[in-house]
């Protein structure tokens, strides 16, 4: 009787499925509830989309990581971190100054630049040139000690809504400055000035566009730094976008680039847990930044062809501020910063110092600033499924709001 045996087979299969899911559920309930919810929620493209921040290059066309071939320790660590966040990386080999010849430097006083900074500059130039050679529309360039929050996709989704609006705001604010040089009421205090120079992200309408998460009318998005000044206040035309109640921002008392540094201005200028997108001003450390094809071409011209006379992070900061020779207000690049940053330096257990500064992280704290659910701090826990450890001992969103 074929129909009977068919029915039985179906029943058996259905029963098998139910059993399978029960066991699966039980297993997760027993072993790793947090890590299970973590992996489904954050580490993988949510609905297997290949575009937008949910994909494995975070909505950029490529992610390049600069790693010196002799620093396999750093390569191992960042590759593991990337795997737990479902990110795929392309490597740009770091460069040793011994492999460079004097005549290969662009004009400029490169002799004042330290050997470590020379190597770093060359590696960044190679990354930028790769963006150009492969005709990439956008790329994220990261140094191999970068750290990020396990919720990086959520953060970038919101960040992208802001970066799509920022170029327009910057242009308006710049026009305003030219028309009417700043002459703000000196009676206004810093907080009031900051408030009037800012606009809330929720008040800006923007369509979701997974093919163009970050917009395209910019040159540099400086996502990971160790200090970025806010632009001067702009009262009649805001030059900052606020993301309020961002649970991934640590409490104000933690907002500083290192333990001994003074607090960042945003810790007092804005309500706690506010992230600020802004027209870039002086910025330090190239931990992570994105470029467009247009931005890459300008940068390679500036520092690969025209002049090399300072460390690359100072150079990039100058570029963004129109301080490079021959820069004019009308042709200023569009550079967007974020405060606190989304990527931060990870200082490991004290052995693996930086090759740029020529100093170890000895005397410095272990960990990374600004990042709450640090992927690096949680590498072991992610493996064992113990759940995520918060870096700053901050209360969660619900606790904060008295929930
Ligand atoms: C990720 O999304 C961006 C933007 O839509 C796209 O340019 C890029 O090619 C995608 N990357 C992958 C690996 O699919
Ligand atoms: C580079 O990319 C742009 C836009 O994606 C395209 O219009 C152009 O034809 C490409 N150039 C080459 C040489 O492939
Ligand atoms: C950066 O700040 C300085 C001093 O406040 C200002 O003169 C300069 O115009 C700013 N640059 C940009 C790009 O806003």
Image (tube, rainbow, N blue to C red):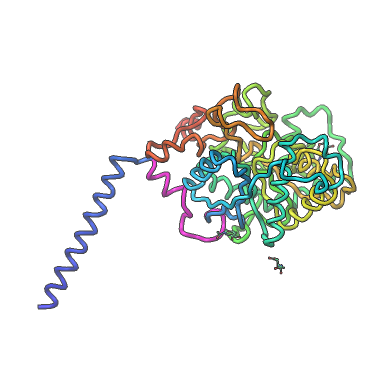
Closer-to-camera residue (292/52): 292
Closer-to-camera residue (342/69): 69
Span shown in magenta: 35-54
Residue drawn where x is 59% and y is 58% of the image = 208
Residue drawn where x is 57% and y is 57% of the image = 52
Image coords of residue 296 (percent x, y):
74, 54
**Where, quadrant-wise, is the N terminus in this rendering?**
bottom left
Give the mark count: 0
Q: Is residue 370 left or right of residue 174?
A: left
Q: Is residue 3 left or right of residue 383?
A: left
Displayed quadrant of residue 259: top right
State ligand 1's quadrant: bottom right
Image coords of residue 31 (percent x, y):
30, 40
Is residue 279 magenta-colored?
no
Q: Is residue 326 above or below residue 185?
A: below
Residue drawn where x is 20% and y is 59% of the image = 16
Q: Is residue 244 above or below residue 21?
A: above
Q: Does residue 199 appear in this view? A: no
Is residue 49 magenta-colored?
yes
Q: Does residue 154 appear in this view? A: yes
């Amino acid at each position: 009787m074929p129909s009977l045996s068919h029915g039985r087979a179906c029943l058996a299969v259905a029963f098998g499925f139910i059993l399978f899911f029960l066991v699966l559920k039980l297993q997760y309930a027993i072993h790793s509830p947090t890590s299970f919810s973590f992996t489904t929620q954050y580490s993988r493209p949510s609905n297997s989309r290949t575009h937008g921040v949910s994909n494995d290059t975070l909505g950029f066309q490529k992610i390049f990581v600069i790693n010196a071939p002799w620093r396999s320790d750093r390569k191992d660590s960042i590759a593991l971190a990337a795997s737990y966040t479902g990110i795929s990386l392309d490597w740009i080999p770091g460069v040793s100054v011994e492999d460079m010849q004097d005549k290969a430097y662009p004009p400029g006083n490169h002799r004042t630049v330290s050997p470590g900074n020379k190597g770093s500059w060359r590696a960044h130039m190679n990354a930028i040139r790769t963006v150009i050679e492969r005709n990439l529309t956008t790329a994220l360039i990261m140094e191999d000690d970068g750290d990020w929050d396990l919720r990086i996709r959520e953060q970038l989704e919101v960040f992208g809504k802001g970066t799509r609006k920022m170029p327009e705001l910057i242009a308006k604010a710049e026009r305003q400055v030219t028309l009417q040089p700043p002459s703000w009421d000196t009676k206004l205090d810093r907080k009031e000035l900051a408030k009037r120079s800012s606009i809330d992200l929720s008040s800006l309408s923007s369509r979701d566009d997974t093919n163009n998460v970050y917009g395209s009318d910019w040159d540099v998005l400086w996502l990971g730094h160790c200090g970025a000044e806010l632009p001067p206040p702009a009262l009649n035309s805001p030059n900052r976008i606020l993301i309020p109640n961002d649970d991934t921002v640590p409490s104000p008392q933690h907002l500083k680039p290192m333990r001994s540094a003074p607090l960042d201005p945003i810790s007092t200028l804005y309500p706690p847990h506010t992230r600020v997108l802004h027209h870039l001003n002086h910025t330090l450390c190239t931990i992570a930044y994105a470029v467009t094809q247009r931005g890459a071409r300008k940068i390679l011209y500036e520092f690969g062809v025209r002049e090399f006379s300072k460390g690359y992070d100072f150079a990039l900061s100058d570029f963004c501020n129109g301080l490079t020779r021959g820069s004019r207000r009308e042709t200023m690049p569009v550079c967007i910063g974020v405060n606190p940053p989304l990527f931060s330096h990870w200082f490991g257990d004290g052995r693996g110092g930086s090759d740029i500064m020529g100093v170890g992280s000895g005397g410095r704290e272990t960990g990374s600033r600004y990042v709450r659910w640090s992927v690096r701090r949680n590498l072991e826990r992610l493996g064992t499924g113990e759940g995520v450890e918060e870096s700053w001992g901050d209360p969660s969103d619900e606790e904060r709001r008295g929930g």
